[in-house]
Structures are given as C-alpha cells and as structure tokens.
Amino acid sequence: MTAIQQVLFIQGGGAGVHDEWDDKLVNSLSRKLGEGYEVRYPRMPDEDDPRHARWSPAIRREVADLEDGAVVVGHSVGGAILMHALAEQPPECRLATIVLIAAPFVGRGGWPGEEFDLPDDLGARLPHGTRVHVFHGLEDDTAPPAHADLYARAIPQAQVHRLPGRDHQLNNDLCDVARVINPDKP
C-alpha cells in the first residue's frame, strides 16, 4: 500500500478568494501532483479581512492534524500568516516542505505589520530540516516581487523561484510548485 502525502494549502485573503481565485491554484496543484497526494484546502475565517488573530489559530489547528512528511503551502497573505504561525509555534509533526506563493513579506523592508512582523531570523525559527521554497511571479502587481528577496534574507536556507511572465496567481499554473513537492514527477 502506497502512503498518501498530505498537502495543506492556505488561501490568500480577500472577498471570494477561496471559491473564486485560489480554488484554481488548488485544482492546478492537485492535477499536477496526481495520485498519492491529498490536498487539503480549508476556508480561513473572515477571508475578506485576513487577520493574524483569526487566521493563525485556524492554521495551527489544520497543521496539528497533519502527519509527519506533510507539505504546507501558503498563498499571498495566507503565506505570510502561515510563516509567522510556524515560527511562533513550531508544529509537532515533521514537515517535509514549506512553500510560499506570492507572499508579501510583513516586516523590515516589506509591508508594515499591524499585528505582527516576520523576524529577521525567520529561518532559524522554522522546523529544522524542513525544505523551504519561495515562488514569486515577476509580473505580480499585488505583492512586490522584491519581497521574495526579503524572504531569502530572513530564511537563508530557502530556495527562491522568480517566475518571469507570472502574476500574483502564477497564472493559475502550479506546475513549478508541484515539481518541488514531487521532484520525480515530470
């Protein structure tokens, strides 16, 4: 019997994002990964007003249900809140990979934080041995592509993927993300 790898996808924020925008990302990722993966896509509370105080506990509950070897993916502001939640309280399970997609950097050099700032030593606060990948479309007009460099500075072990011609939604094509989750898939 083949093990199923869990992938938790944390949506971005905004009215209708779960059902009208990020669902396309999840569908693309599920299709590209194929069999052997269970992509979980919970609806975050008050998606039109993403607040750390509401989203962080919801993210922690979802992460607590994961098994060792799971992958967590965060899109846009959901990625920034995911990173802060993981750094603030590392999960009990062993994560295989953390993936950020078009995530704004909240903190020094990035967006000002109302509820939190990502620490300069973010990489040291993440679960040891977890691979980190940061994807950012170079045509993103929502979260500046330069924010990927801020993540690279704060997480020295991260691999940054700058994607020419891709927008904030990576043109609804997560083939590059699927390849880092499953490098054996063409």
Image (cartoon, rainbow, N blue to C red):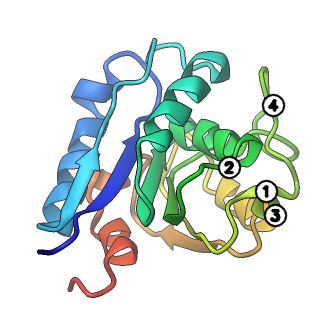
Residue 87 position in % (x across, y down): 73, 48
Question: Mark 1 is on which residue type?
Answer: Arg
| Amino acid of disc 2 | Pro
Q: CA distance from mark 3 to mark 2?
A: 11 Å
- Residue 136 visible at all: no
The three-letter code of the residue at mark 3 reads Ala
Upstream in sequence: badge 4 or badge 2: 2
The numbered mark, 3 or 2, whose residue comes first in the sequence reads: 2
Regarding residue 70, the answer to whether it shows in the image is: yes
Label 1 element class = helix
Which mark, by number, is residue 112?
4
Quadrant of the image for the C terminus? bottom left
Give the left or right position of residue 128, taking residue 49 as reference. Answer: right
Depth check, mark 4 against mark 3: the one in front is: 3
Residue at 54 percent across and 63 percent down: it is 94
Asked whether the residues under the numbered discs 1 and 3 touch, taking CB atoms below 8 Å apart as contact, a structural biologist would say yes
Q: Which residue is mark 1?
A: 125
Of labels 1 and 2, earlier in sequence is 2
Characterize the local packing of mark 3: few (<14), some (14-19) or many (20 or more) Cα atoms within 10 angstroms: some
Say which of 166 and 50 sits in front.
Answer: 50
| Residue designated by label 2 | 90
